[in-house]
């Protein structure tokens, strides 16, 4: 698919209501919290708990979960490195629209490649993209195996499985690290929740 980036015939229309206006209406800043980590590390569980906490405090949120997005807008993508790149690009672009709408976005996606995560970060303004590395060793993720996917991957029933037959590139400079093998759910959630809360004020 060809990109329209250099198409001189497409002109940007600037609306009168800005992101700042929408944030003011919501009484808080907007941003995207990007949870990256192996399958089973705790991304979805954490993103969901953090969203519940923020929601109960009157913060406008939206959860973009890789698994769910692959049922809809990204249902034509598989797990090749190229398709993962496109998956991340689209999720970042959708997230950007939500951030522009004044919302705190929680994105839970493996996003195994550093370059794809950096590309995602690059489309946001300063402080708007918060990379949370959900750290958990492969053997612990495999022991949890909440969806039985590692078992299938080991049996050769799933090709290109992250951590087994495809790489996961550990983030070098994440904004936050949550070590889910050494902290319980409540502690992990609190760490992310507090980080966000400190940055919501307009
Ligand atoms: N081959 C392979 N590798 C990794 N994961 C796989 C694969 N096949 C299916 N699944 C399921 O898809 C979920 C990952 O989707 P993502 O969109 O987050 O992946 S990626 O960011 O594009 O790498 C992932 O969700 P999580 O377990 O929540 O991470 C799996 O449930
Ligand atoms: N500190 C923790 N944070 C998040 N999940 C944890 C933690 N400790 C144990 N878990 C468990 O690990 C599993 C993670 O699954 P899930 O959230 O689906 O991971 P992912 O979305 O990364 O694939 C869940 O069963 C969850 O209860």
Image (cartoon, grey):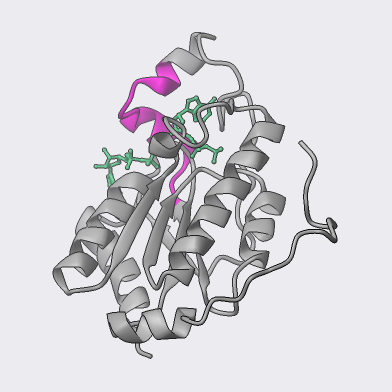
Question: In percent of the image, x 60 and y 57: which residue is there?
Answer: 171
What count of labels does the image hold?
0
Q: Position of residue 104 (x, y in %)?
A: 37, 68
Looking at the image, can residue 139 be seen?
yes
Report whether 75 appears left or right of 169.
left
In the rendered image, the vertical position of residue 85 relative to residue 118, given as above or below:
above
Quadrant housing residue 124: bottom right
Q: Is residue 82 above or below residue 187?
A: above
From the viewer's side, name the closer residue of 43 and 65: 65
Residue located at (43% from left, 46% from top) = 136
Magenta stretch in the rendered image: 135-151
* Residue 34 placement, left or right of 76: left
Which x, y percent locates residue 3?
78, 47
- Of the 4 image quadrants, the one containing the N terminus is top right
Snapshot quadrant of residue 15:
bottom right
Q: Nearer the viewer, residue 6 or 174?
A: 6
Q: Is residue 182 above or below residue 131?
A: above
The residue at the point 25 percent across, 73 percent down is 59
Q: Is 123 drawn above or below residue 108 in the view shown?
A: below
């Amino acid at each position: 698919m060809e990109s329209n980036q250099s198409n001189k015939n497409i002109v940007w229309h600037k609306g009168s209501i800005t992101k700042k206006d929408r944030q003011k209406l919501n009484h808080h800043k907007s941003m995207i919290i990007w949870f990256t980590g192996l399958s089973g590390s705790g991304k979805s569980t954490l993103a969901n708990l953090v969203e519940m906490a923020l929601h109960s405090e009157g913060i406008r949120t939206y959860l973009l979960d890789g698994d769910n997005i692959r049922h809809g807008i990204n249902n034509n993508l598989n797990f090749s490195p190229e398709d993962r790149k496109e998956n991340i690009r689209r999720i970042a672009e959708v997230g950007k629209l939500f951030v522009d709408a004044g919302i705190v976005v929680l994105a839970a996606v493996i996003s195994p490649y550093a370059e794809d995560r950096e590309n995602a970060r690059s489309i946001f303004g300063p402080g708007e993209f918060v990379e949370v590395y959900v750290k958990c060793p492969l053997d612990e993720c495999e022991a949890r195996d909440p969806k039985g996917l590692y078992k299938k991957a080991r049996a050769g029933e799933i090709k290109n499985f992250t951590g087994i037959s495809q790489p996961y590139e550990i983030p070098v400079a994440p904004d936050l690290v949550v070590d889910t093998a050494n902290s319980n759910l409540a502690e992990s959630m609190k760490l992310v929740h507090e980080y966000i809360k400190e940055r919501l004020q307009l």
